[in-house]
Amino acid sequence: MIGRQNLISARKRSRSTKGRTKSDRPKAKEEKSATFASEEEYSKSQGFQLDPKLRKAIESYAMNEATTYFESLAHKVVDVSARRPYDLECVKGKSKLHVEVKGMQSKGESVFLTAGEVGFAVKHASEMALFILHSVQIDSSGNVGGGVKEIQIPWIVIDEDLAALSYKYQVRRR
């Protein structure tokens, strides 16, 4: 099961601090160091663009770049992002490629995926591609441009490369 090991590891890491002594708890200096480490990690990952207009502009720009790329390889490209757990369907002859597109301003060392995206990618690994457009620039007028393309074909999702970021907890009422 995808993510099961990550789920188990995350549960182990998130165990309560109950029963720990004061000396076992992180010191302020260690917490500050962890904050800087997480900020550095954030600059490498996809991150969250808070401005919805800029987020949409980056997504659209990445989709256009991916479409242009696959069309240059003689694929017929269709945007299926509104109804499928991937973004583009690329057909060339009898072969079909399902493409997940990610666009970001950061260095693109990690991206956020939904459970649906991961599940589909695992089931269709030989037909999957991951198109990442990272280091995208936005000028003072909000124009989007540049970026570095990174394409993985086939895109094989490896369980150890996944990290659980959140869980839904069903509260039981007594």
Image: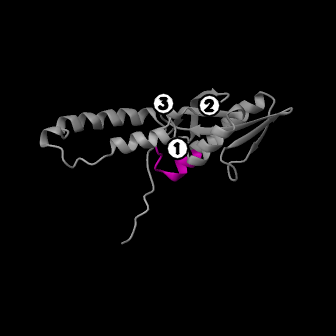
State the residue in front, 121 or 21.
21
Based on the picture, tell me whether residue 25 belongs to the magenta stretch: no
Q: Secondary structure at mark 2?
A: loop
Q: CA distance from mark 3 to mark 1?
A: 22 Å
Query: Left of 120 or right of it: where is 139?
Result: left
- In the displayed structure, 160 sits above or below 88; it is above
Q: Earlier in the sequence, mark 1 or mark 2?
A: 1
Q: CA distance from mark 1 to mark 2?
A: 38 Å
- In the displayed structure, 150 sits above or below 101; it is above
Q: Earlier in the sequence, mark 3 or mark 1?
A: 3
Q: Secondary structure at mark 1?
A: loop
Q: CA distance from mark 2 to mark 3?
A: 21 Å
Q: Give the extent of the magenta segment.
A: 48-57
| Amino acid type assigned to the residue bearing label 2 in the image | Ile
Residue to which mark 2 is pinned: 156
Quadrant of the image occupied by residue 66: top right
